[in-house]
């Protein structure tokens, strides 16, 4: 705020702004001092004043990360995962570095250290969250960071995406192993995943009210990318829904089971079936690949899978060369 006071035969105007140095100037007329102070305040509101770099001495990187976690990430659907990543980052010594001392070399050393323990995709996600926090600090929080140090280091290249699909006979082996399991819904969950290509979270949030039996569609209101979609249900998917008996049908959810429960059952299932290196998410890869093998176009598959970027869609698509031989022969 601005203060005007008389000092001797002159009027002194002083303007204070948070995180900015105090500016003062003296005038012979009070009206001139008021006009000058008003103009300075307008410039300050337009970010024309340079923030006081001494602020960086009292702020640590951990302060930015905590603020991002508690005020921004908390609003995200994936908050639990982001909070887990950020809390792990906060335990590293780099988080205690003052912003006045923080340099790209700190993150370069962090990158090289972490790559010995985690995959490039994991590291890039960690650095991405910290980079966003630094950007917000500079752009919206009034912290005078000159350059974002995370942006100035090279990031590891993302490794090749998983190409794991169900091998011949593996689905039958899984279903047979499920016969001795104690989860009444797991067989339906697995079959529904293969038939629809839906993510695990989408499957477990699906409600009976969102199923249109007449049109054989399912509306998915909450998705990973924030864009709701309606997908067609194959005869196999409809058969799964019809097969859920009345005694198991309870409440609004089609599959009333938690994500953690599915994760634990899946781990036991693949061990019991003797199948190696098969993730539940690989069923989504399998489904998307099957859609293409059926002859569906990229837009048609994207409508079902929910991918907005075709490049991401192709990462989930693993066609078998041997399966295309007959198609080439027919052509």
Image (tube, rainbow, N blue to C red):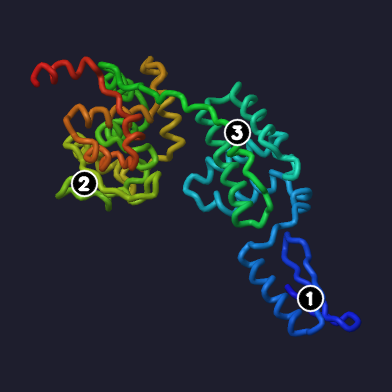
Quarter of the image that includes the N terminus? bottom right
Q: Residue 13, labelled with which disc?
A: 1
- For image coordinates 72% across by 45% down, the residue present is 99
Whole-number angstrom distance, CA of label 3 to CA of label 2: 46 Å
Whether residue 235 sits left or right of residue 196 in the image: it is left
**Disc number lying in front (3 or 2):** 3
Q: Residues within 10 Å of mark 3 (few under 14, many from 20)?
A: some
Quick check: 34 left or right of 167? Answer: right
- Between circles 1 and 3, the one closer to the viewer is 1
- Label 1 – label 3 distance at C-alpha: 44 Å
Q: CA distance from mark 2 to mark 1?
A: 69 Å
Q: Percent x, y for residue 41?
A: 68, 71
Q: Position of residue 309 (x, y in %)?
A: 34, 39
* Viewer-proximal residue among 72 and 328: 328
Q: Quadrant of the C terminus?
A: top left
Please, which residue is most extreme toward the front here? 28
Label 2 sits on residue: 217
- Which percent across, then down, holds residue 246? 25, 43
Residue at left offset 56%, top offset 52%:
72
Q: Which circle marks residue 42 in the picture?
A: none
Element carrying mark 2: strand
Looking at the rendering, which quadrant does residue 287 occupy? top left
Q: Position of residue 312 (x, y in %)?
A: 36, 34
Could you say which is closer to the camera, residue 18 or residue 182? 18
State how many labels appear: 3
**Which label was assigned to residue 153?**
3
Compare marks 1 and 3 and give the one earlier in the sequence: 1
Query: In this view of the protein, which residue sits in the foreground, 242 or 2?
Result: 2
Taking the image as shown, residue 139 lies to the left or right of residue 207, namely: right
């Amino acid at each position: 705020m601005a203060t005007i006071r008389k000092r001797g035969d002159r009027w002194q105007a002083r303007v204070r702004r948070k995180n900015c140095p105090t500016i003062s100037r003296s005038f012979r007329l009070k009206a001139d001092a008021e006009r000058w102070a008003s103009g300075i305040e307008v410039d300050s509101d337009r970010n024309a004043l340079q923030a006081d770099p001494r602020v960086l001495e009292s702020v640590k990187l951990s302060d930015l990360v905590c603020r991002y976690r508690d005020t921004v990430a908390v609003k995200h659907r994936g908050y639990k995962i982001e909070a887990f990543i950020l809390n792990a980052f906060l335990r590293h010594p780099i988080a205690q570095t003052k912003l006045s001392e923080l340099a790209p070399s700190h993150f370069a050393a962090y990158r090289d250290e972490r790559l010995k323990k985690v995959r490039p995709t994991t590291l890039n996600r960690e650095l991405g969250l910290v980079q966003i926090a630094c950007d917000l600090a500079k752009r919206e929080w009034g912290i005078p960071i000159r350059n974002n140090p995370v942006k100035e280091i090279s990031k590891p290249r993302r490794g090749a995406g998983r190409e794991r699909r169900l091998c011949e006979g593996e689905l039958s082996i899984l279903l047979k192993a499920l016969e001795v399991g104690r989860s009444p819904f797991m067989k339906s969950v697995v079959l529904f995943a293969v038939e629809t290509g839906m993510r695990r979270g989408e499957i477990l949030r699906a409600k009976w009210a969102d199923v249109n039996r007449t049109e054989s569609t399912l509306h998915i209101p909450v998705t990973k990318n924030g864009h709701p979609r309606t997908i067609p249900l194959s005869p196999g998917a409809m058969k799964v829904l019809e097969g859920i008996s009345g005694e198991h049908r309870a409440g609004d959810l089609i599959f009333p089971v938690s994500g953690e429960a599915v994760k634990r059952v899946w781990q036991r299932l693949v061990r019991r079936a003797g199948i190696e290196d098969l993730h539940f998410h690989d069923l989504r890869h399998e489904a998307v690949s099957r859609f293409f093998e059926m002859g569906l176009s990229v837009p048609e598959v994207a409508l079902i899978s929910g991918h907005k970027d075709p490049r991401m869609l192709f990462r989930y698509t693993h066609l078998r060369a041997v399966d295309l031989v007959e198609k080439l022969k027919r052509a």
